[in-house]
Image (cartoon, rainbow, N blue to C red):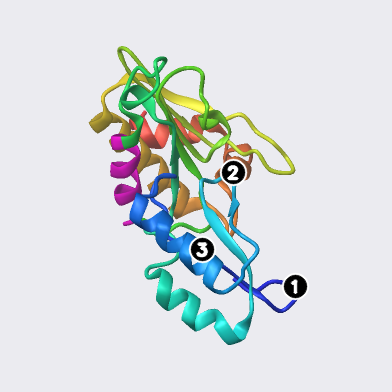
Amino acid sequence: MHRADGSFTVVPRVALGSLSADALAKINAVVQEYSLAGVRLTAGQHMMIDGVSEDILSDVVARLGEVGDTYKYKVQACLGNTGCKFGQRDSMELARNLEAFLDKFNLPSKIKASVSGCSMCCVESMVRDIGLLGKNVGWTVSFGGNAGKKPRQADVLAEDVTSKEAFEIIGKALDFYAENARIKERTARFVERVGIDAVKAAVFDV
């Protein structure tokens, strides 16, 4: 990533906000060896190394190994019931599956997705293009949220569904979006333009 000051930002590969001890040690060693300022954590669960000059860029990337996102549509997730006392469902596992599921789509704009393991909604699923929120009885699926300059709360497409049903719903919503959205039109603006009823009609064949 090229910065305004002529330096670069290198993004070590981080899956769902989790890094192994070996990966952390490698990043720390690179930052110290090349006298870099440190790392920056983003709201999207990325880790970024800023201020990498062009003359050391290739060396830094080579030392770090794989950089950049694993999938083209990244998913955020909380710990869910694997590490939080409030978690009601396994959000981490579902998020891993969701990243792989989204990878097959070619969409007209970037999308942001997140999976929350309970109604506390710590990863803000209701303001994401695709949101999943876990309850004891199943998943709530939402679509068309945005937390940018013009925030929009997502519309709920279904509640209390299984993970398989949730993916079927998401797939149909994204197919309709891909076929009818304008280039670079995010889902929030798309839903505002065509109406959530049109999305639901496409998803549920009504």
The residue nearer to you, when weighing 73 against 54, is 54
Tell me the magenta residue range: 93-104
Q: Position of residue 102 (x, y in %)?
A: 35, 50
Q: In this rendering, would 32 be left or right of 105?
A: right
- Most extreme residue toward the left is 164
Q: Hey, which quadrant is residue 141 in on the image? A: top left
Q: Quadrant of the C terminus?
A: top left
Q: In this rendering, would 177 be left or right of 89?
A: right
The circle on residue 11 is 3
Secondary structure under badge 1? Answer: loop
Q: Quadrant of the N terminus?
A: bottom right
Q: Is residue 155 visible?
A: yes
Cα distance in 3D space between marks 1 and 2: 21 Å
The residue nearer to you, when weighing 57 against 152, is 57
Q: Is residue 101 magenta?
A: yes
Q: Position of residue 50 (x, y in %)?
A: 63, 65
User: Counting residues from the N terminus, which is met first, the one under dot 3 or under dot 2?
Assistant: 3
Query: Which residue is label 2 attached to?
Result: 43
Badge 1 crowding class, 10 Å Cα cut-off, few under 14, some 14 to 19, many 20 or more, is: few
Cα distance in 3D space between marks 3 and 1: 17 Å
Secondary structure under badge 3? Answer: loop
Q: Position of residue 57 (x, y in %)?
A: 54, 80
User: Counting residues from the N terminus, which is met first, the one under dot 3 or under dot 1?
Assistant: 1
Three-letter amino acid code at disc 1? Ala
Q: In this rendering, would 127 be left or right of 138?
A: right
The residue nearer to you, when weighing 134 against 2, is 2
Residue ID at (53%, 54%): 47
Residue ID at (47%, 65%): 29
Magenta span: predominant SS is: helix
Three-letter amino acid code at disc 2? Ala
Q: Position of residue 120 (x, y in %)?
A: 51, 18
